[in-house]
Image: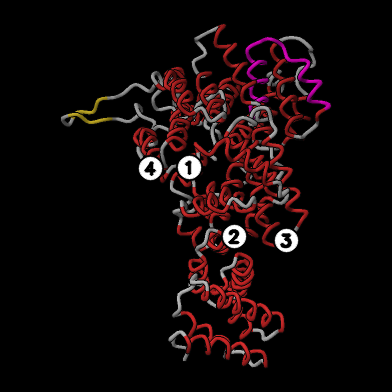
Amino acid sequence: RLQMLHRAGFKTKTNIKGSLDRHDAGKAKEKKVPDMETFLQARDWSGALGLAQWRLGTEECQNDPSKKSETLLWMAYCASHLGDFASALQNIQTYMKSEEEPEPAAQLWKAICLYAVGEYKEAEQCALKGPSSHLGPLAQLQNRILFHVANKMADETKLTIYLQKLTTSIEDQLSLASMQFMRGHYQEATDVYKRILLEGRENLALHVYVALCYYKLDFYDVSLEMLQLYLNQYPDSPCAVNLKACNHYRLYNGAAAEAELKVLSASAGVPISQSEDPVLQHNLCVFRGGDGATKVFPPLINVMPEALINLCIYHMHRSEYNEAFQLIKNFEPNAPEDYIVKGVVLAAVGQENNNSEFKKQAQQCFQIVGSAPSHCDTIPGRQCMAMCFFLLEQFEDVQIYLNSIKQYMAADDNFNFNFGITQASLGHWRSAEEAFNSIQSPDIHKEFTYIAWKAKANIHTGKAHLAWEAYLSLDASPKSYTLLQMIANECYAQGHFFYALKAFDVLERLDPSPEYWEGKRGACVGAFQRLLAGKEPRESLREMINMLRNTSNPQVEYILRVMKRWGKDNNVPTG
C-alpha cells in the first residue's frame, strides 16, 4: 500500500536562485530579483515563500500595513502549497490579528488550515463564522469545507445536508469527487473527473487525479498513460513522479519504483533518501521492502493511515502478530485494503489463540471486501471471499473462488499454500500434494502448519516415508509430538502400518499409556501381515521385533514367538 498526494497544488522544493550575486571573470554581475509572479508560474513555492519572507522583513513592508497583510497572505498561500498548513495557519492568524477588518474569506482560509492539521471541530466552528450569504463563491467554499469536516467527524446527517447544497461548479464537483475518492468509491470519482475533463481540457492536473483513481482500481498501465499527459508538461512534479513510481512498484518491483524517484532527487539537489517529504519517506521505505520501517512508519501514523497499515504488514511478515494486533485493534477501516489487512491480522491472532470472536470479525472483514460491487470480480475480492469461507470451513465454496483465480496466481506461494489446504480438506490429496510441492518460500517450508499438512498429504498419496522424514527433521517440542500423533493415526487408517508402528513406538516410549500400546500392537500385526503378503520388505522384520521389545507387556512375547518362528522358517534374520 502506498500513500499518494491528492491535492490541487503540487509541491516542489527548489533552491532560491537569482538573488545571489555571481562572479564571471572577476566581474560581479547583478541579477534581478524575480517577482512573485515568476515563482508562482514556475510552481516554485519554496522560492515564492522565501521572497515573501524577505519582503516581510523589509522596512517598506513594516511601515505599510496593507503590504504587510498582503505578504502574510502570500506566505500562507505558499506554505499551504508546500503542505505546511501549520505555518499557513500561523500566517493567517497573524494577518487576522493585524487587520481591523480582515478579508471576508479569512475565516474560511483559517478553517481550511485547521482541517488540514486535523482540528476538525475548530475548523467547523471557524467555517461557520464565515460569510453569512447563502450565494456566491464564498458560500460555496464554506459549504465545501463543512462537507469535508462532516465526513471526517463521521456525521452522516450533516454530510447529507451539505452534499445537497453542492452545485455544478467545477470546484464543487471536484469536492464531490474527492469525497468519493476518500470513501473508496474510485470509479465514481473517475466519472466525475472525466466529465470535468470533457468540459475543459485545460484542467491538466485532473489527469493526475484520474491516474490516481485508476491506480486504486489496480489498472496500473492505464494509470501510467493518464499520468504521462501531465508529466509531459511538468516532469518534475513530486505528486506525479511519486504516483508513477507507485505504479512501477505494482507492475515491477521496488528497485524499478525507486529509480523513478531520481527525477525528484535531481530537481531538489539532494539524494531522495534525505528528502524531508513524509510521503516520499514512507514510499521509499515500502519500495525497499520495509527497510527501516520501525523508524519511518511510527511518526507518520497520525499523518497518513497507510503508515499504520504498512507497519502492520511489516509485523505480519515477521510473524509478530501481537504487535500488528495492537496497532490495528482500534483502527476503523475505510478502504478495501484496510479491511483486508485488518482481516488478515484478526485471522492470524484468532487462529494463534483459538479465539472464535477474532475469527468471526476477520470473516466479516473479508466478506465486506469480497461482496463489494467494486471488488467482487477482482482477484483481491475473490481471495477475500475464499478466506471468508475458509474461516467458516466451507471448503467447497473456497475451492470455487480459488479455482476462478488460479491461472493468475500459479506462482504465488501463499495462494498455493491455501489452495493445498483447501484440497486436502476436501480429500483431494494428490492435488493438495502438488500445491504443497510447488511452494518455494523457505519461510513457509519452516512453518509447522505447512509441514503437518504436507506430511498428511504424503501419507494419503502413499508416501508415508516422507511424513516420517518430516518428523525426524524437527526438534523435540510439543509441535513435533502433535505431528507424531497425526502420523501414527493417519498411517494406521491408510494401512501404512510399518510407519504407524514406528510412530506408536516413539509415542509409547514418551507416554506408556494403554492407548498407545493398542495402536502399536495393531500396527505391528498389520505390518507383519503386509510382510507376509509381500508388500513390506523382509528386512523390516528385525526392526519390527526390536520395536516390540521396547514394550513390557505379556502380549509381546506371544507376538514375538509367532514372528520369530516365521523368520526362522523363511530364513529371515530376526535378531
- Quadrant for residue 38, please give it: top left
Q: In terms of secondary structure, where does tag 3 sit?
A: loop
Which circle's residue, 1 or 4, is located before the other in the chain? 4
Crowd around label 1: few <14 · some 14–19 · many ≥20 (10 Å): few
Q: Nearer the viewer, residue 72 or 454?
A: 454
Cα distance, mark 1 to mark 2? 27 Å
Q: Nearer the viewer, residue 483 or 234?
A: 483
User: On residue 410, which mark appears?
Assistant: 1
Which circle's residue, 4 or 3, is located before the other in the chain? 4
Where residue 355 sits: x, y (%)?
75, 58
Question: Among all residues in the image, which is located at the extreme top?
Answer: 199
Q: Residue at x 70, y 15 (%)?
A: 138
Answer above or below: position of 135 versus 81: above
Decide whether residue 178 is among the magenta residues.
Answer: yes
User: On residue 320, which mark appears?
Assistant: 2
Cα distance, mark 1 to mark 4? 24 Å
Q: In terms of secondary structure, where does tag 4 sit?
A: helix
Q: Nearer the viewer, residue 37 or 60?
A: 37
Magenta stretch?
157-182
Answer above or below: position of 469 versus 382: below
- Indicate the quadrant containing the N terminus: top left, top right, bottom left or bottom right: top right
Crowd around label 4: few <14 · some 14–19 · many ≥20 (10 Å): some
Q: In terms of secondary structure, where does tag 2 sit?
A: loop
Amino acid type indicated by mark 1? Ala
Q: Nearer the viewer, mark 3 or mark 2?
A: 3
Q: Nearer the viewer, residue 558 or 49?
A: 558
